[in-house]
Image: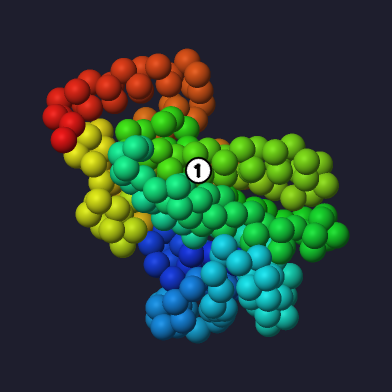
Amino acid sequence: MRITDAHAIVTGGSQGIGLATARILASRGARVSLIARDRERLDQAAAAVGPGCRSASADVTDPTAVATAVDALVADQGPCDLLVTAAGASHPGYFEALALDDFRAQMDLNYFGTLHPIRSVLDSMLERGSGTIVGISSAAGLVGVFGFGAYAPSKYAVRGLMDALRAEVEARGVFVACAFPPDTLTPGLETENLIKPPETAAVSAGIKPKLAEEVGAGIVRGIERDRHVITFDPQTALLARGGGLVAPIAYRLMGREVRKVAHP
């Protein structure tokens, strides 16, 4: 798509991947709008993106709040041409130790927090016969990872949502993509590392985390090149394209690392 002068709405835009993506979109000439919960952090992020950036505070798990925020941003900046759903978080832990509420909260934030913004912009895109939607899944949305029993299903759900949406709306002019970032150096990863099981840490130790700016640049590059599947490293690219043929190898390598750690 042509990013210059497009109205791009980024959820989770106050920090991490969302903020990095927003800054790059603005540098390409997009009219950028941010949605996130924390008003103070959102104001700081909007200032970092640039003078033309607009923002609206909303919890992406609340469909009414999201719709209200999108309506306000559209009234100010025009119809949404590009939506990037970067709001999300991970709550790792041993499966048997995770509370049922942890599973619900992960699905509510990562899946429904992707669905609600899409529903808020899709009708307008279909009416105009144009638009681009990018959902942010995860490398853990391609292969199950030790310690992500609550997180990985929510990211698999995002992947399934984008696949189904693509099948339904692309013939009507709306381009749909899904991004699969690996571990990325964000405040969310710092929080995650505080509670991550040692086996999970061992599995991820062999892969150097990406900078948020690298992931943001990859997302924008994927948008510009009309990539349905956006990846950021060779391992994830192989999983995304190799599917069931590659997954057994990934599980075997993962199991080897897990066995090195003594389960408490």
Taking depth in this image into account, of 167 and 156 the one nearest to the observer is: 156
The picture quadrant where one finds residue 78 is: bottom right
Residue 211 % position (x, y): 31, 54
Q: Tell me the SS state at disc 1.
A: helix
Residue 181 % position (x, y): 42, 45
- What number of labels is visible? 1
What is the three-letter code of the residue carrying label 1? Lys
Q: Establish if 259 lies above or below 37.
A: above
Residue 69 seen in the figure? yes
Residue 139 % position (x, y): 42, 38
At x 30%, y 39%, the residue is 94
Q: Establish if 12 lies above or below 40.
A: above
Taking depth in this image into account, of 43 and 172 the one nearest to the observer is: 43
Using a 10 Å C-alpha cutoff, classify the residue at mark 1 as few (fewer than 14 neighbours), some (14 to 19) or many (20 or more). many
> On the picture, is 101 further left or further right than 77?
left
The picture quadrant where one finds residue 15 is: bottom left
Residue 101 % position (x, y): 45, 52
At x 65%, y 59%, the residue is 116
> On the picture, is 124 further left or further right than 155?
right
Taking depth in this image into account, of 87 and 241 the one nearest to the observer is: 87
| Figure quadrant of the C terminus | top left
At x 57%, y 41%, the residue is 157
At x 38%, y 62%, the residue is 16
Taking depth in this image into account, of 264 and 242 the one nearest to the observer is: 264
Q: Establish if 228 lies above or below 11.
A: above
Q: How is the image coloured?
A: rainbow
> On the picture, is 44 further left or further right than 136?
left
According to the picture, the residue beneath numbered tag 1 turns out to be: 155
Residue 27 seen in the figure? no
Q: Establish if 86 lies above or below 49.
A: above
In the image, farthest residue toward the right:
127
